[in-house]
Image (cartoon, rainbow, N blue to C red):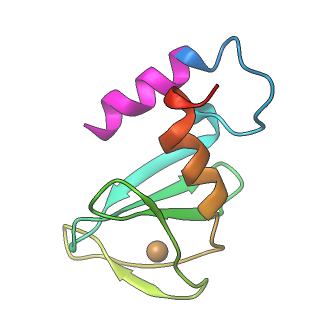
Amino acid sequence: MLKKMLAIVALSSLGVSAYAVDASQVQKSIELKDGSTVYIFKDGKMGMEDKYGRATYMESGHVMETKDGKKIIMNGNEIWRVDELLHKDHRG
Ligand SMILES: [Cu+2]
């Protein structure tokens, strides 16, 4: 589902210059054990999406557990970048 969303965002970002954020800045997204998703941007900063698909706050330095049991440490808290990713398709 996320991959599909990212593809849609990538397609729709071509004509949009008002936002500095687009899917091409996402290096990867990782599913977490609790159903949320962490996006890692190309500059190494991260942002969180909760299991309901909303951009969510997480303090930098917080340890998260991925679906496959790995531990990753939150780097940054790019909530606004995730928010732009998630809502781009329905903003004017
Ligand atoms: Cu996090």
| Pick the front one: 82 or 76 | 82
The residue at the point 22 percent across, 65 percent down is 35
Left-right relation of 74 to 64: right
Provide the major secondary structure of the magenta segment. Answer: helix
Residue 84 placement (x, y as % from top left): 60, 44
Specify the farthest residue to the top.
15
Left-right relation of 72 to 34: right
Specify the farthest residue to the front.
92
| Pick the front one: 49 or 31 | 49
Find out whether residue 81 is within the magenta segment. no
Left-right relation of 92 to 82: right
Find out whether residue 4 is within the magenta segment. yes
What number of labels is visible? 0
The residue at the point 43 percent across, 87 percent down is 63
In this rendering, is residue 6 above or below 27?
above
Residue 79 placement (x, y as % from top left): 60, 63
Q: Which quadrant of the figure contains the C terminus?
A: top right
The residue at the point 54 percent across, 56 percent down is 40
Highlighted magenta segment, given as a residue range:
1-11
The quarter of the picture where residue 49 lies is bottom left
In this rendering, is residue 20 above or below 71?
above
The residue at the point 70 percent across, 11 percent down is 15
Q: Which quadrant of the figure contains the N terminus?
A: top left
